[in-house]
Image (cartoon, coloured by chain):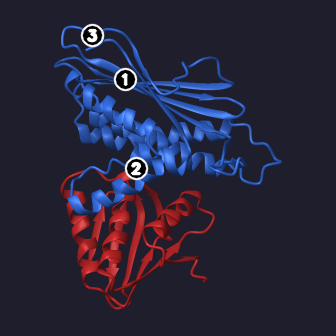
Chain colours: A blue, B red
Amino acid sequence: MPSTTQIFGHFIEPHDAQDALGLTFSSLQLPLHSRWLNNSTSAHFVATYCSTFFPIHSQSAQWSRPEIHEIVNYITNELLDNAVKYGWASPHAPLLTTLQLGVFPDVIRLYVGNPIHPRIVGSFQEYVHRLLTNDPSALYFEQMERNASDGVHVSRLGLLSMLHDYHAQLAWKFGAPEPPEESLSVTTMVQLSRTRAQEGTGESMAIF
Amino acid sequence: MKIEGNHYAIIYNADTTTLSCQGSFRLYSGEEYNSITDLLHTVAAQKPVMLTLNLRHLQFLNSLGINMLYKLVIYVRDYRASRLVVQGKPYNFWQEKLMLNFQRLMPDIVIHWNGAQ
């Protein structure tokens, strides 16, 4: 396994934002399902904070604070749920999950970081590579069809829905393995842009 | 048929062949999800002439909840027996996205906003 940081996609380090928020969740004993249930509270808080401070420009017909709230609530919830599902800490150590929000004039960036077990790094990185190098629309609808026929309990639609439905840009930063169990930290970045070119038309489309 | 969970309910009225999804679906995997998918499959398998999916009181779906609805649309589509009508909540940004995806899965789906055609 590589001993240095690995980047997938266009990862932008958190930097000075117009408005920013940082949260750290530390969980030692709380059962998985309890942590899961708490994510909706956190997502709602982050979405409310973001929609309050995002600069709404009156000349755009599509921007509204309720829409920003919906999008950020959904995405934050998905990112935190993934952190609960895939996060791993060595026994007797707290599981740390970090969340950062950066609000800029034309962009919102969300970052969720958590440690993962070295055993799943390879498959996760393969999945990430697939997301970044294939048409998200095709992947999204293929996954829906597969889910309908194979009856498993995971949807694998969270990140795809961000890419397809919200035109988000995704990127990942994998830290170096840390002893003694060689866990890695992974940070998922989701960027939502105020406008994004529509495919094939060259026209810009306001997302929010 | 009815399933009630933490902040949500799914209710099927066999007389009106209407399936209503209400509340917030923050689905976790496992038994909860199995019960719901079983209900959806049972409803689709009854092959009503018209099946109405009422989402007017739906507040939130996580990705597993969204998957639940995509499954229903695919089940109904593949049985080729029922007309599927979806009643959406107007001015709801994420429901508009959902409806577009429904239309791609099943082009002859009918979408109503607030009951109007």
Give x and y (percent) for residue A169. Answer: 54, 36
Which residue appears at 38% of the width and 32% of the height?
Answer: A129
Task: Rate crowding at label 3 as few (under 14), some (14 to 19) or many (20 or more) other CA atoms within 10 Å.
Answer: few
**At numbered mark 1, what does the secondary structure look like: helix, strand or loop?**
strand
Which residue appears at 48% of the width and 79% of the height?
Answer: B108
Give x and y (percent) for residue A160. Answer: 43, 46
Mark 1 near mark 3, Cβ–Cβ under 8 Å? no
Residue A40 in sight here: no
Residue B5 in sight here: yes
Q: CA distance from mark 2 to mark 3?
A: 33 Å
The residue sitting at the front extreme is: A200
Q: Is residue B35 left or right of residue A102?
A: left
* Residue identified by numbered label 2: A139
User: N-terminal of the two: label 2 or label 3?
Assistant: 2
Mark 2 near mark 3, Cβ–Cβ under 8 Å? no
* Residue identified by numbered label 3: A178
Pick the residue in front: A99 or A158. Answer: A158
Quarter of image, res A52: top right
User: N-terminal of the two: label 1 or label 2?
Assistant: 2
Amino acid type shown at disc 3: Glu
**At numbered mark 2, what does the secondary structure look like: helix, strand or loop?**
helix
Amino acid type shown at disc 2: Leu
The residue marked by circle 1 belongs to what chain?
A
* Residue identified by numbered label 1: A186
